Amino acid sequence: MDQTSAILSPFSFAVFRLTIEAIEPLHLPPFKGSAIRGSFGLMFRRVVCPLTRTECGDCHLSEECVYSYIFETFPPKDDPFIRNKDQASHPYILRPPLDGKEEYEPGEELMFELVLVGRAVEYLPYFAYTFIHAGKRGLGRGRGQFFLKRIDSLDMNGTLTPVYLDADQLLRNETIHISCGELLERRPPPDQCTFRFVTRLEIKAKGKYPEITFGLLFRSLMRRITTLAYLHGGIDKCREIDFRGLSHAAEEIRTVSSDLYREDAVRYSNRQKQRMPFGGMLGEITFEGDMSPFWPFLLPGEWVHVGKKTSFGLGQYVLD
């Protein structure tokens, strides 16, 4: 096992499938990530925060606050490894359904996934409690009410283990953790791989949308995985990864084919009271070369996504 694989092997996360059932008609956009994130984000703060009128950056409780950790995610002060950042990578990722369905009648179910990284898994009860209360406030246009029917923990094969059922409203200690080491054991690196982006990829360089190359994609993924592993997984050895060497090596990987295309979209931010850009790249891009140095980043990236706005569900890809 090479040094990078050894360092990142303990990096772990848990994947939960939440099933909600409509009590009233639900009217949702085709991409539901923004609606779901907005609904539970607002309610999470109401449920957890004792000082809702105080900005997190000014709050003397922010370093101990669950809401601040999950949603604001301030990096440690004066940490040279996480420098020049007002916010770090959030320890959660929403994975909304991609069926484009917009209307749900009472009694219909909607399922989506929630990925919690590292120690954020400990806060699953807060997420469950928040979604229970978010159902009373409602979701989507018209705020249709719903209830949280169940939460299941997923393993790498997609097998479900119940951790919460509305029938008894008990949280079970049955969470399944997935580690980078397990992913690497199950799937050796190929000499050619295709990234199939199933949700929009947003990557900017110097304020512009550049051509997607393996080097650009890998650097974004490397920054994200190491930040998640360092901040939320407690893996201090991330400092020892040869970032410069890996970045140079990534430039040697060539693009075989690409049918990536840009899809523009907007979302409304309740927090900022304005429409925000929400576009990105979709489609497939195939690369060729020795993938083994990059594999410890590419495999977990399938689960934790890449690029910006991952907490809404953007940047999800499948490796073929």
Image (cartoon, helix red, strand yellow):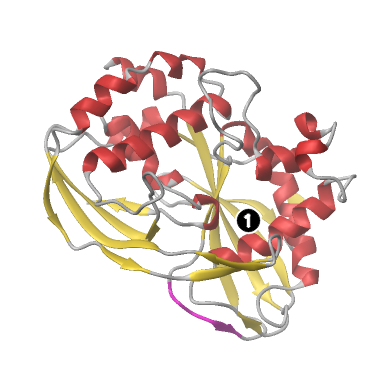
Q: Residue at x 38, y 50 (%)?
A: 203
Which corner quadrant of the image does residue 134 belong to?
Answer: bottom right
Up/down of 113 relative to 25, above or below: above
Q: In the rendered view, does 142 fall on the left or right side of 247?
A: right
Check if residue 287 falls in the magenta segment. no
Residue 235: percent from the left, percent from the top?
Answer: 51, 20
- Measuring from the top left, give residue 135's x and y in whole percent: 75, 68
Say whether residue 101 is magenta.
Answer: yes
- The answer to whether residue 204 shows anywhere in this view is yes
Residue 68 appears left or right of 290: right
> Which residue is drawn at the image coordinates 53% and 41% (left, top)?
14
Mark 1: few/some/many CA within 10 Å (<14, 14-19, 20+): many
| Residue type, numbered disc 1 | Ile
Label 1: which secondary element: strand
The secondary structure that most of the magenta stretch takes on is loop
Q: Which residues are magenta?
A: 99-104
48 is higher (above) or lower (below) than 182: below
* Picture quarter with the N terminus: top left
